[in-house]
Image: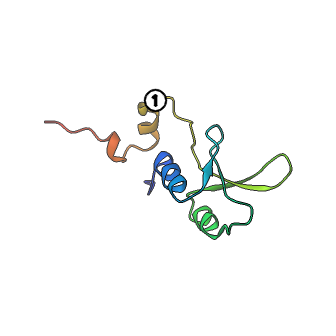
Amino acid sequence: MTMKINPLDLADLLERNGYALDEDSGEVYTDPESKTEFLVTLAATGHLTVKHNAEFQLGFHIPHWKCYQSLKDYCNQFPHEQQCKCYDV
């Protein structure tokens, strides 16, 4: 299955739309009074994961956040992504 958007592009788009991102964990933060319907939709479609924190509160996380040590590792996981394709010229 090819991802519709890679984790780094998803993070960039979320930040452009006013969401904050924890650079270490990939957790997506929003203002406590903001509605989270968009994040719930992303989680329901597999673009975000939902995890409990130490206080057992649910949080939204970008899957595969910072689990790649190199572009080679990334391309092993997602070989059909444009940046992973090689062409003979």
Q: Residue 80 location in percent, x, y?
A: 36, 47
Q: Amino acid at mark 1?
A: Ser
Residue 45, compared with residue 80, is above or below; it is below
Toward the top, the furthest residue is 69
Toward the right, the furthest residue is 55
Query: Along the horizontal axis of the image, is 56 left or right of 41?
Result: right
**Quadrant position of the C terminus in the picture:** top left
Tell me where residue 67 sits by quadrant. Answer: top right
Tell me where residue 35 sits by quadrant. Answer: bottom right
Q: How many marks?
A: 1
Q: Residue 63 location in percent, x, y?
A: 59, 48
Which residue shows up at 61% across the image and 39% down it? 23
Residue 3, compared with residue 85, is above or below; it is below
Which residue shows up at 64% across the image and 66% down it? 40
Which residue shows up at 74% across the image and 61% down it? 32
Q: Residue 9 location in percent, x, y?
A: 46, 49
Toward the left, the furthest residue is 89
Check disc 1 and report its element: helix, strand or loop. Answer: loop
Query: Along the horizontal axis of the image, is 88 left or right of 58?
Result: left
Task: Mark 1: give few (<14), some (14-19) or many (20+) Cα within 10 Å.
Answer: few
Which residue shows up at 59% across the image and 50% down it? 62
Q: In this figure, which residue is indicated by the disc labeled 1?
A: 70
Q: Residue 81 location in percent, x, y?
A: 37, 47
Q: How is the image coloured?
A: rainbow
**Quadrant position of the N terminus in the picture:** bottom left
Between 83 and 87, the one lying in front of the other is: 83
